[in-house]
Image (cartoon, rainbow, N blue to C red):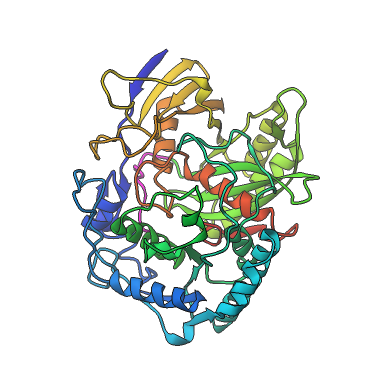
Amino acid sequence: MRARILEEPELEFGNGGRHVDPRTGISDYGPVDDAAPGAPRTIRVGIVGPADGVTGVRQWLERCREPIDAKEGNRHPSLFRDFPGCSPNSAFRAELVVDDSWTRPIAARSLKQAVGKPIGLATAECVDLYHQEIADLSERGVIDVVIVARPDDLEDDIPARSRSNADELEESTTLDAKHVDFHDLLKARSTAHRPPIQIVRSTTWDPQRDTAKRRSRRRPSLQDEATRAWNIHTALYYKAGGVPWRLQRRAAQLDSLFVGVSFFHTNDRTRVHTSVAQVFDERGEGVVVRGGPAARHKDDRQPHLDRDGAAQLLGDALDAYRREHHNFPARIVVHKTSAFDDTETSGFEDAADQRFINHLELIWISDGGEGVRLFRDGDHPVLRGTLATISRDRHLLYTRGSVEYYRVYPGMYVPSPIGLRPALAETDIETLATEVLALSKMNWNQSQLDGRLPITLKASRRVASILKHMPPGAGATARYAHFM
């Protein structure tokens, strides 16, 4: 085994500024689209939820216009940064605007009646109540994004059992339909409308709020207020059409398209379908492409596409890219949560060949990390960016671990690596792994630099959990902002 530590990839921000950390980069240089004519200077926000939720969101957004100090007793200022505020004169160069006519309080009596029913029916009725108001706001045509204050007493998202490792992800490569929650159902219903939605809990603005989640044994730890503000405002900026940061691109690099492929069961559990979150080049702009049926192979019990299905899936992703950019990329990198068989590989090659794209790379990324963990001398976990080669086509990459810039490991449990298995690659493994590290920073729902999965797979899994609630053909090609 050979191990080495990769350099932390930088991101690009406004005025050509570069930094490894999203929050520091935004604070120092502003969003990467700062000078672009289409950058969102005014973000028009609608709010839907209980009356006290609407009030709570408005008051908290008003508070976030001004800077918010980092957590008290902060010993890691690079990790826990002050929030600079969201106003035309702050780091984001934008302001959030809420008008009374853009708020939709939901009657407390209606919500109480809904949440008192069995959980499946309660979730569906709450989604109906919220969706009616979102649809009405959408018809007005002036809203950029809708913030949804979810019901406090809805118990849909309380898991039956907790996990022992915060980094642990489900071992299956598919998402099933056993667990239905408010978030996924409402997102599925709302993709038909122009403004994306941002779902928040009341503990965002009131950490002591009494909620079903808080009363359960599975009470999540709450981030400090400055971090919550960073994460939500980054997401709102992106959903309003902005680009907070992008991957660094060197002049000699080929224009690359990164595609993530994951699988999900339909709600009747009779079929396995595919979903793709396509990430547009270095800007991280994504579009969702829905694929056809897949089947589990008897030999490895993993879902696979047939040749035509693989060709259709990647072809649709490439055609969506061309509609946006008016040309095809020079290079395609496909990340998948299961192994590539010969039939799938041939199908992906067909899609590239039909569009005269010469550079195609296929990487199987596994959560299990090949069943191997590394340890370093002393008390600290392995550094993020540690790459270990087990054999020619088997590698481990630590996307979580001690972070040199933070000077600490920002986690609670021993980190585990992900596995990288190139099935078709021209690029060396160090470059492919560095791209995975960089793509792990492209999750607009958080602003910390050490995501576990690259956005290709993080997004495709998120999309899969929502697509399973949508009828065939719906959301076939949609902007990723509606799913995140």
Residue 132 to residue 215: above or below: below
- Main SS, magenta region, reads loop
- Could one spot residue 145 in this view of the protein? yes
Instruction: From the viewer's perspective, tell me whether residue 38 is left or right of residue 455.
Output: left
Instruction: From the viewer's perspective, tell me whether residue 109 is left or right of residue 341.
Output: left
Residue 314 to residue 343: above or below: below
Residue 73 to residue 400: above or below: below
Q: Quadrant of the N terminus?
A: top left
Which percent across, then down, holds residue 230? 33, 58
Which percent across, then down, holds residue 34? 30, 64
Q: Report if residue 245 lies within the magenta region.
A: yes
- In the picture as drawn, the residue positioned furthest to the top comes out as 1
- Could one spot residue 426 in this view of the protein? no
300 or 251: nearer the viewer: 300
Which percent across, then down, holds residue 358? 56, 36
For the record, the magenta segment spans 242-253
Which percent across, then down, holds residue 302? 69, 31
Q: Residue at x 19, y 44 (%)?
A: 75
Q: Residue at x 47, y 15 (%)?
A: 390
Task: Please identify the quarter of the rendering in which residue 401 is found.
Answer: top left
- In the picture as drawn, the residue positioned furthest to the bottom comes out as 101
Q: Report if residue 329 lies within the magenta region.
A: no
307 or 440: nearer the viewer: 440
Instruction: From the viewer's perspective, tell me whether residue 306 is left or right of residue 242.
Output: right
